[in-house]
Image (cartoon, helix red, strand yellow):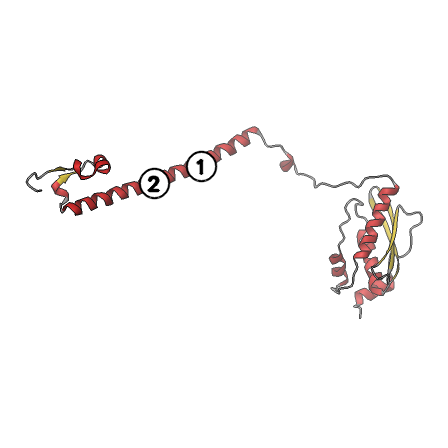
Amino acid sequence: MYNKIILNKFIEHKNSGRISKPDGIADIYNADETAHVEFSLRIENENIANCQFRAQANPYIIAVCSTIADLVAGSDINEVMVTPQQIKDELQDNSDIDIDFCFDCLRLAIDDYFESNHKEKKIRKPKKTEESSAEPKLVDILNLLNNSIDESQEKTDIFESQEEDIVESKEEIKKEEMISNLGLNDDDFIFDDDDMLDFGVDFMTLKNSDKK
């Protein structure tokens, strides 16, 4: 039923017992009250110097508590990062047995430490490197704005160029249509393009006045 790792943890049950005059302590039952666990903590310089447990439970829960006690030792009391999945990975077991209450018990023991010592839990922020902690300089901000403006202008110029090409293309098409409709050739007249666009064929001067 249990693998060798779980059985070894159960047999050795390291860190079992209760710390004398603990800095934090708590006990809890699981949902159906078939297991009862307790964690006691010794805290030194905001670190968990020692963590011990007691449990009235099956070998699996005892192995879980023993593993938790091993992993939290030496941790910063403000940021204990052990998770249920981490424990299951350590035990090489992915069963659906509820172990969340064991972690609830550990959190209660940590809370007991803060409450008993009238302390507030500190939120540890990641340390910034010199580069990331430096405030942005005004010249950097201006350079960024100028780059953005240049990019916008470049996109505008490209758009206007494309728009001019489209207009020129439309003019050529319109000119060819007018020539075709009149039944004339290019050599028969001189185009004033601007006038033609605005007023049509009335501003075309025929070269050959005999041709109607």
In the rendered image, the residue lying farthest to the right is 20
According to the picture, the residue beneath numbered tag 2 turns out to be: 163
Measuring from the top left, give residue 68's x and y in whole percent: 81, 55
User: Between tags 2 and 1, which lies in front?
Assistant: 2
Query: Which badge, 2 or 1, comes first in the chain's sequence?
Result: 1
Q: Is residue 143 left or right of residue 132?
A: left
Q: Quadrant of the C terminus?
A: top left
- Count of marks overlaid on the render: 2
Q: The disc labelled 2 sits on which kind of residue?
A: Glu
Query: How many angstroms separate mark 2 from mark 1 (CA)?
Result: 16 Å
Q: Residues within 10 Å of mark 2 (few under 14, many from 20)?
A: few
Measuring from the top left, give residue 94's x and y in whole percent: 74, 64
Q: The disc labelled 1 sits on which kind of residue?
A: Ser
Eyeballing the image, is 70 above or below 189? below
In the rendered image, the residue lying farthest to the bottom is 1
Measuring from the top left, give residue 135's x and y in whole percent: 62, 32
- Determine the residue positioned at 82% across, 56% down: 102
Disc assigned to residue 152: 1
Q: Quadrant of the N terminus?
A: bottom right
Query: Circle 2 — which element?
Result: helix
- Determine the residue positioned at 86% across, 42% down: 115
Measuring from the top left, give residue 27's x and y in whole percent: 88, 53
